[in-house]
Image (cartoon, grey):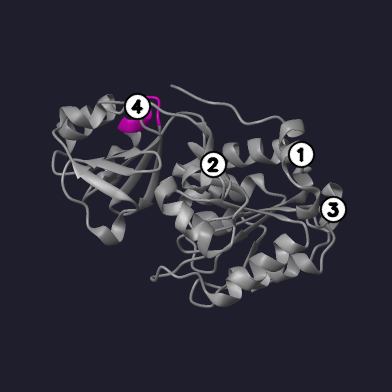
Amino acid sequence: MATTSLPTTAALASSVPSSRLRAPLASSVMVALDIDGTLLGAGWEVPRETRIAVKALRLAGHHVVLASGRSLAGVLPVARSLGLAHGWAIASNGAVTARLNPLAPGEHTIQEATTFDPEPVARLVAAQLPETQIAVEETGWGYRTSTPVPDEVINGRQRVVSFEELWIKPTPRVFLRGAGVLDLLDPLRALGVTATTGGPTWVDVTPPDLSKATALDAVRQTLGIPSTHTVAVGDGINDIAMLTWAARGVAMGHAPAELRAVADEVTGTIAENGVVPVLRSLLATSPASISRNSTFDRSVR
């Protein structure tokens, strides 16, 4: 595996203009938001009331961090839609951490990227479920794919390659798509990688021992945010670790039972724009009151 390191807290603080810090660090909350099924439904446009709520949080001095299973190429347009010109974004289920910067090439810099060799994964899939579609992520660009992937299910560009070209270089993430793909979860994990279901016909494969939660905690430490000042909202199985990590973990109303079981509360569905009341509640709540062991009102629906 290959990794790069996050900047130190001191370096981060020195590079952020004081005019951008609208609240003392001790009063700031770090809010981690999943994208698909949390901020976005069937369409590609973030609802206006969500954009307004995110902007209000940032003006109050809080840190909004996108945390998605999407590739970075799919996360960045959502960050722009939300007006997140500065800050942090987690992609590829925690394998990629980017710092948003409108002056940098592509409006971001890669702060940490953990990769693995996709060859064992590709060979296992070919041997056990040869009809399965394989897509190997190239950070910030798109995917090398075994067969064409429909545009509506992929973020970024794609290039169909030969079987051997799927592993020409390490990757932060591979996604597998096809009938029966969930049968590969245990064999994949036996290879030492992280395998997470994204639906009945979808499996994400990432490097070992990481998740959205591990990446978010590295950002939290860099920002100097107390662990008790963390909130996370999500709707999928790949959000379990993130909601468990947060002091206040919120599941969307349409989330599967496994996620709702670990959440501190359940908000409305994506059709109800359930993330908005959660974001608004933080504007009227002191950071000290958001811990799961506090008396915070968890009745947001």
Answer with mark 4 or mark 3, whichever residue precedes in sequence.
3
Q: CA distance from mark 1 to mark 4?
A: 32 Å
Residue name at image x 14 percent, y 44 percent: 131
Q: Quadrant of the C terminus?
A: bottom right
Residue 35 in sight from this viewpoint? no
Query: Residue beneath label 2, please?
Result: 98
Query: Residue beneath label 3, please?
Result: 27
Q: CA distance from mark 2 to mark 1?
A: 17 Å
Answer with mark 1 or mark 3, whichever residue precedes in sequence.
1
Return the mark for residue 13: 1
Between marks 2 and 3 in the image, the one whose residue lies nearer the viewer: 2
Region rendered in magenta: 187-193
Residue kind at label 1, given as amino acid type: Ala
Q: Is residue 165 left or right of residue 8?
A: left
Q: Which secondary structure lies at badge 2? A: strand
Query: Residue beneath label 4, please?
Result: 170
Callout 4–callout 3 Cβ contact below 8 Å: no
Q: Is residue 31 shown above or below 45?
A: above
| Between 30 and 197, the one nearer to me in the picture | 30
Q: Which secondary structure lies at badge 1? A: helix
Q: CA distance from mark 4 to mark 3?
A: 40 Å
Q: Which secondary structure lies at badge 3? A: helix
Callout 4–callout 2 Cβ contact below 8 Å: no
Answer with mark 4 or mark 2, whichever residue precedes in sequence.
2
